[in-house]
Image (tube, grey):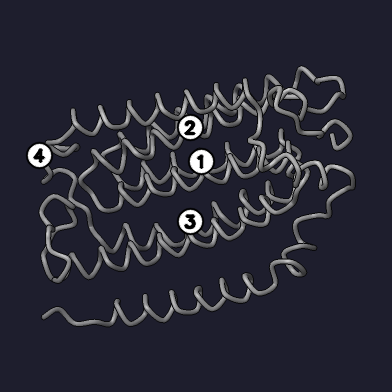
Amino acid sequence: MLEAAVPSRRGFSHLEPVAPIPMLTRIAFALLSLLVLGSGVLVITRRQPLRALRWLVVALLGTAGIYLTAGAWWLFGVQAILYAGISVAVMVPGIVALHVDVAAAPRLFNPRLKLALGASLGLALGLGYAILRGARLGPPGWATGALRSRASGAFPAPGVPSHAEYALWVEVGALLAVAVVVGVASLVGRQPE
Amino acid sequence: MIPLSAYLGVGAGLFTIGVIGVLIRRQVVAVLMSIELMLNAVNLNLVAFSRSFPSSGGKVFVLFVMLDAIAQAAVGLTLALVLLRSRATVNVDENRLLKW
């Protein structure tokens, strides 16, 4: 994977590995992509929040499977066990406490449905154009130098730079997490005016 | 090897679905789940770029995004609870004031 990662302005194909492609990986990627996108659609169309949460978990697990096809084994474990699990652990009590009465809600979507769909269609077209253009032209010139210097050697597992290069930001993230916990506790205990 | 464009395409599709959910849904919980979908799409792009360009920075950044997603879910649901107590509704269309 690493030996072919020499950037150029002739497209992303020069960054792809030269190893033979297992057909199973492609099939798994296609199936998982369909699963993730289908689950995403079901998340935003389910009326019951707990059912939407169920499909959100399916989307998260499908994304974890896509991480496997990209060779990110470590992130697969983090996503499947920690991220999906904590999302359920955080959201289920919140949804249950909210007592969302779906029968009382006359409309599932808001009145600006057409405007929102039009804006989303514009976003999708823009993203599609950017991806196709990037696949044709390759990375920008300012990025090729840094990528070429990094392509010469192997890179460590994510845990190593997170404790070496990103130690400060890990600490900042931990402090923000503590602030979130304190903020949530104070907000829950707040009495309505 | 699966091309980078395929990963980016799936990420773009998932991000667009999340944007649609944020824009069209009325429940706060559904909006939060749609934001989770968008952050998931961002993670997918980071992993794909980290695979194609030999750097572990993207994978490390995915951890930060996961932390952020969990924190926003916790804070968002808490705000929804506070909103429910004071306004008796969790529909975003019926809550137009930042102060409640």
The residue depicted at 24 percent of the width and 41 percent of the height is B25
State the separation of the CA atoms marked 2 and 1.
7 Å
Front label number (1 vs 4): 1
Element carrying mark 2? helix
Judge the density around disc 1: few (<14), some (14-19), many (≥20) Cα neighbours within 10 Å: many
Picture coordinates of residue B99, whole percent (x, y): 15, 71
Picture coordinates of residue A50, whole percent (x, y): 35, 47
Element carrying mark 4? loop
Asked whether the residues under the numbered discs 2 and 3 touch, taking CB atoms below 8 Å apart as contact, a structural biologist would say no
In the rendered structure, the answer to whether residue B22 lies left or right of residue A54 reads: left
Hey, which quadrant is residue A12 in on the image? Answer: top right
Front label number (2 vs 3): 2
In the rendered structure, the answer to whether residue A116 lies left or right of residue B5 reads: left
Q: Are marks 2 and 1 on the same chain?
A: yes
Judge the density around disc 4: few (<14), some (14-19), many (≥20) Cα neighbours within 10 Å: few
> Given the image, what chain letter belongs to the residue carrying mark 1?
B
Residue under pointer 2 = B12
Mark 3 is on which residue type?
Ser
Hey, which quadrant is residue A117 in on the image? Answer: top left
Picture coordinates of residue A143, whole percent (x, y): 68, 42
State the separation of the CA atoms marked 4 and 3.
28 Å
In the rendered structure, the answer to whether residue A170 lies left or right of residue A180 reads: right
> Given the image, what chain letter belongs to the residue carrying mark 3?
A
The residue depicted at 45 percent of the width and 79 percent of the height is A179
The residue depicted at 67 percent of the width and 37 percent of the height is A141
Residue under pointer 1 = B41
Residue A87 tag number: 3
Residue under pointer 4 = A106
Mark 4 is on which residue type?
Pro
